[in-house]
Amino acid sequence: MDPTCPSECIYNLIPSDLKEPPQPPRYISIFKATVKDDMQKAKIAMKTMGPAKVEVPSPKDFLKKHSKEKTLPPIKKFDRNMPKKPAVPLRTDHPVMGIQSGENFINTNAANVIMGVAKKPKPIYVDKRTGDKHDVEPSGLVPKYINKKDYGVTPEYIRRRNEELKKAQEEYDRYIQENLKKAAMKRLPDEEREAILQGLKKNWEKVHKEFQSLSIFIDTIPKKIRKQRLEEEMKQLEHYIGVIEKHKIIYIANK
């Protein structure tokens, strides 16, 4: 019988043989006891939200009246023999007056001005028509550095470096002279070196002009190959020019 239906409902005449299916047993891990024992062993006192056991306060330690009030410092005993402060001057007391000096301050000041050295005015400069004044010394307008003792003198480290370069050049020339005798090398004349350098520069200008005349859109394989070839030629010529300009003395082997 369905409890939701009234007693005269037709559905109550149908026998209800339906039964609820049995529920499966609940899963229980076989390691439950082991985990529980481990958790109990890992628990240590004072690792909770407070002490594991709190001592009950003693009934004798109750809060007493006026126990939290501030106490006054101890009273010092008054001693009449302590030194006293100086007395306040009386109303009838008057300061000492009428003392005059025999020095003539007008003549003294006049003599100090006449004999003293005149104070030099502070050098300033005006950079605007409105009259803005600034000190000259920190502005950089005063030639202070040319008055130094070492102004215009070659520094010691530059002289030392020049001497080292000179010695290195002499050793290199000596080494080259020895190799010249052995390998029969000769020095490239300056005129020939300059002619080679100018020729390389003209070739670079020619290749550069050809590179500048390329089309804007490099969309085909021949154009890409030509551009790559011109870039490689310019890079090689720049390398040769840099080597010749860097080395003033060049030796070549006799053929």
Image: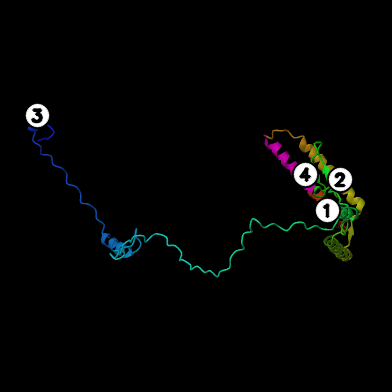
| Three-letter amino acid code of the residue under disc 1 | Lys
Disc marking residue 10: 3
Which residue is identified by label 4? 234
Would you call the spot at circle 1 few (<14 residues within 10 Å), some (14-19), or many (20 or more)?
few
Pick whichever, 124 or 161, lies toward us: 124
Q: Earlier in the sequence, mark 1 or mark 3?
A: 3
Spot occupied by residue 43 in the image (x, y as percentages of width and height): 32, 63
Report, in whole angstroms, how far the alpha carbon at label 3 lies from the one at label 4.
Answer: 106 Å
Which residue is identified by label 1? 246
Q: Secondary structure at mark 4?
A: helix
Pick whichever, 210 or 170, lies toward us: 170
| Three-letter amino acid code of the residue under disc 2 | Gly
Q: Name the image quarter holding the N terminus.
A: top left
Report, in whole angstroms, how far the alpha carbon at label 2 lies from the one at label 1.
Answer: 17 Å
Viewer-side label of 3, 4: 3
Q: Earlier in the sequence, mark 2 or mark 1?
A: 2
Of all residues shown, which one is farthest toward the front?
92
Q: Are marks 3 and 4 in contact (CB under 8 Å)?
A: no
Would you call the spot at circle 3 few (<14 residues within 10 Å), some (14-19), or many (20 or more)?
few
Which residue does the image show at 40% across and 59% down from the upper left?
A: 69
Which residue does the image show at 73% across and 39% down from the upper left?
A: 227
Which residue is identified by label 2? 199
